[in-house]
Amino acid sequence: MRKLFVASLMALCIAQPAMAEVPLAQVRARPAAGETIYFLLPDRFENGDATNDAGGLRGDRYKTGFDPSAKGFYHGGDIRGLMARLDYLQGLGATAIWVAPVFQNKPVQGAPGQESAGYHGYWVTDFTRVDPHFGTNAEFKALIDAAHARGMKVYMDIIANHTADVIRYEEGLYTYRDRANWPYSRKGGLDSPMINPGFAGDEDSTEANFAQLVDPGAAYTPVVPLAERNAKTPAWLNDPIFYHNRGDTTFRGENSRFGDFAGLDDLFTEHPRVRAGMIEIYADWIRRFGIDGYRIDTAKHVDPGFWRAFIPAMLDTARQAGIPNFTIFGEVAHEGSDPGTIARYTRRDGYPAVLDFAFQGAVRAVLGQGKGTEVLADTFDGDVLYEGGEVAALAMPTFLGNHDMGRFSTLIRKDRPGISDTELLARVSLAHVMLMTLRGSPVIYYGDEQGFVGDGHDQDAREDMFASKTASYNDNVLLGSNASTKTANFNAAHPLYRLIATLAKLRKDHPALARGRQVTRTYSEEPGVFSVSRFDPVSGNEYLIAFNTSDKPVSAQSVIGASAKSLESLFGPCPVQVSAPGSVTVDLPAFGSMVCRITPSPETSVR
């Protein structure tokens, strides 16, 4: 019956898309630059199958992980629910769906009184199958095929840094123990017995060297509870020798790479067996499911050598599978608008792209923290730091907020205590215009298009799109709407949904806005005008985009291409003509913006 259901559901989704079916070759021919990405947590998006809410488990929430009234437990969203809402995503203008991890997770973990569930997907026990709370492998394949038929790509969120928390330490302590005082050559400290003779340390990732690592207990003595000795799949993951076993990270210094992330078992990614095993796992998902890309979690907590082996292997596997533009971008969590920290991962570690935390920091600085628009100019000036420079920056996934740091609306409310809902909506709207028209591949965090305003970060920023039973979500006031999360929020008439859909269509109709070169034009030390030109990647035609980050109307001159003569308004109040060659008057209301197509003088060329 289950197979029959999946087959019929897949046939329905593919045979009756909202628009004519898009050839798969056409989807795969699109480069990463220019996609409009929608990021969602399956558990919080839509519940399409109530029978899998408990993941096939029995008992209370501490056994099943299911409690829709608690923000830290499963709420019931699943793959079938996501499939049922593809029309909604297509109407928004999404061209790629980034799905939080769907792998089978440890249902519940945490100390007594601090338990929560793996609804988010980052506590993996089985890397080869979909978590039963979300559905089946067959349903996930049906989702990918249905998305492809509509011209949308699917990016999987993956983890190579850690697994679920299974390993315990015999010592009963979990404070990080560093490599200098607890070297691999001693069992439990400098004055302890010698172990692992001949092991040259973690900098030599050859099989010959790691063959000498036979005792995983240099810092702590790892113990796997009897009931969980075979908890992980593939089976090699159950051996403590493949983990660092050094205690919890504080996210600073050495322990940022070698420590357990909030107790999660930290994989020994320098080990050649771990590298080969992770490559095998994730290459298999590409071959079996035909996915279009990977967002890689906790990238900065893994050694660079791992990525230099892993990323080329994924790209090569994808090419062999007929996916020439397979997308890979890493999460390098960072605060601030300076791109230097995140850019190093594109050079040293070999990442084709990283989530653009610098862009997020810059937009927050100018719209939440009162900084001058020079912050944006400085951030874009740093595009040369990425491997591939300004061209590579066109594919950087830009974003405003996420499931960890919180929603952009929440961050602005924190930055500006007492802000009115009207002004907050205006600032959030301008941020989305920036997101959709400035360089990069914009990532829309689910619910932002419905005006969600969370109470904070992490669990507080992971509200339900379907009717919620979580009190701390349901008391939130949504922007641009009288609704609450007590009822489902898939309103295509919401002002933010309409705004994003309008801008997504602009990106589709005008390739300059999606993939075109960007040149910063005008900025200042104070809030006010920020303008850029973008250029059509084929014709070279110029577009002027300008924003007013201040809470007052502005009238100012902006630099423009010297060949520009007249302007056509595509979005916002564009001027009709230039003031003089190379200069144009920008008149914008508070938090206003404009997108203008430029007609050059017949005597000159924009090329």
Image (cartoon, helix red, strand yellow):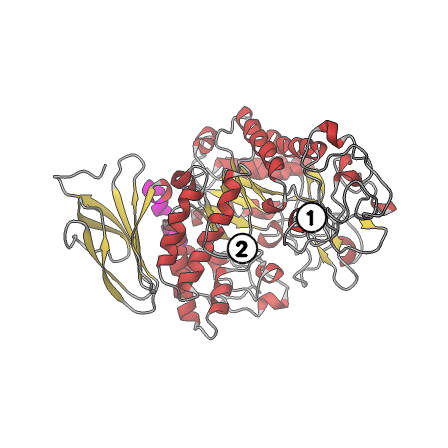
For marks 2 and 1 on the same chain, the one whose residue lies earlier in the sequence: 1
Is 449 located above or below residue 537 in the figure? below
Residue 22 point in image, percent of width and height? 44, 33
> Which stretch is magenta?
498-513
Q: Quadrant of the N terminus?
A: top right
Mark 2 or 1: the one toward you = 2
Taking the view exactly as shown, the residue that stands out farthest to the top is: 320
Is 331 located above or below residue 146 in the figure? below
Q: CA distance from mark 2 to mark 1?
A: 22 Å
Q: Secondary structure at mark 2?
A: loop
Nearer the observer, 101 or 300: 300
Residue found 42% across the figure and 58% down from its top: 363
Residue 546 point in image, percent of width and height? 30, 55
Helix, strand or loop: magenta stretch:
helix
Mark 2–mark 1 CB contact (< 8 Å): no
For badge 1, the amino acid type reads: His
Residue 524 point in image, percent of width and height? 31, 60
**Residue named by callout 1:** 133
Nearer the observer, 379 or 164: 379
Residue found 57% across the figure and 70% down from its top: 475
